[in-house]
């Protein structure tokens, strides 16, 4: 590996953070946020451990260099899954957005709050809601 490369700075002496050129990250424990996310891991609570540096025309700064933060995979924790109670609450909230507040009819689309979440053309034009739809809403 070319130790003289301007972006190769594993000790961070030049860039303040351990720095590797794009594609040259020598530490297999280092991942970008997107890579961790793809493994179901979260960067929550993690410190930036290193960075990738590369030259890009799309860089928004004068020297044309972009960086991406790297995190330690070994320290990353799984993205916290929803508890069953949280999932039920979300499902209830979602269902409420599709349910007429007056007659309980469940629509396939979100009812607008501008209409106070009621049937768009008025409840009277529709049959009473199915009993099982009400049971889910309860
Ligand atoms: Zn209605």
Image (spheres, grey):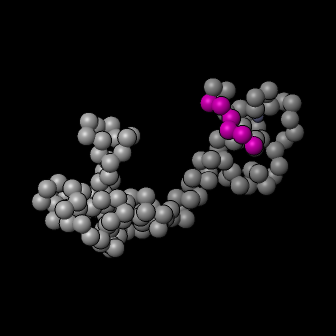
Q: Please tell me which residue is depicted at 35% across the width and 70% down the height of the picture.
A: 73
Up/down of 109 relative to 84, above or below: above
Relative placement, left or right, of 15 versus 122 is: left
Q: Is residue 91 visible?
A: yes
Q: Quadrant of ligand 1?
A: top right
Q: How many marks?
A: 0
Residue drawn at (23%, 60%) of the image: 5
Residue 101 in percent (x, y) is at 69, 37
39 and 120: which is toward the camera: 39
Q: Is residue 45 visible?
A: no
**Image x and y of residue 22, in percent:** 34, 59
Looking at the image, which is closer to me, 64 or 18? Answer: 64
Image quadrant in which you'd find residue 88: bottom right
Image quadrant occupied by the N terminus: bottom left
Whether 72 is drawn above or below 69: the answer is: below
Q: Can you tell which quarter of the image residue 80 is in? A: bottom left
Vertical comparison of 111 with 33: above or below = above
- Residue under the point 32% across and 48% down: 55
In terms of depth relative to the viewer, which is nearer, 80 or 28?
Answer: 28
Q: Tell me where residue 52 appears, x and y as whole percent.
A: 30, 57
Residue 137 lies in the magenta-colored region: no
- Residue 22 located left or right of residue 123: left
Furthest-left residue in view? Answer: 13
Q: Which residues are magenta?
A: 108-113
> Is 3 displayed left or right of 56 in the figure?
left
Q: Residue at x 21, y 56 (%)?
A: 6
- Residue 109 inside the magenta-drawn segment: yes
By secondary structure, the bulk of the magenta-drawn segment is best described as: loop
């Amino acid at each position: 590996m070319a130790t003289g490369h301007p972006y190769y700075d594993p000790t961070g002496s030049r860039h303040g953070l351990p720095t590797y050129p794009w594609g040259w990250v020598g530490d297999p424990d280092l991942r970008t946020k997107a890579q961790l996310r793809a493994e179901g891991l979260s960067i929550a609570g993690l410190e930036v451990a290193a960075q990738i540096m590369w030259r890009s025309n799309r860089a928004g700064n004068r020297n044309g260099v972009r960086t991406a933060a790297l995190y330690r995979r070994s320290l990353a924790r799984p993205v916290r899954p929803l508890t069953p109670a949280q999932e039920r609450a979300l499902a209830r909230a979602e269902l409420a957005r599709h349910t007429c507040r007056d007659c309980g009819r469940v629509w396939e689309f979100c009812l607008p709050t501008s209409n106070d979440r009621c049937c768009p053309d008025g409840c009277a034009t529709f049959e009473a809601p199915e009993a099982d739809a009400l049971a889910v809403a309860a």
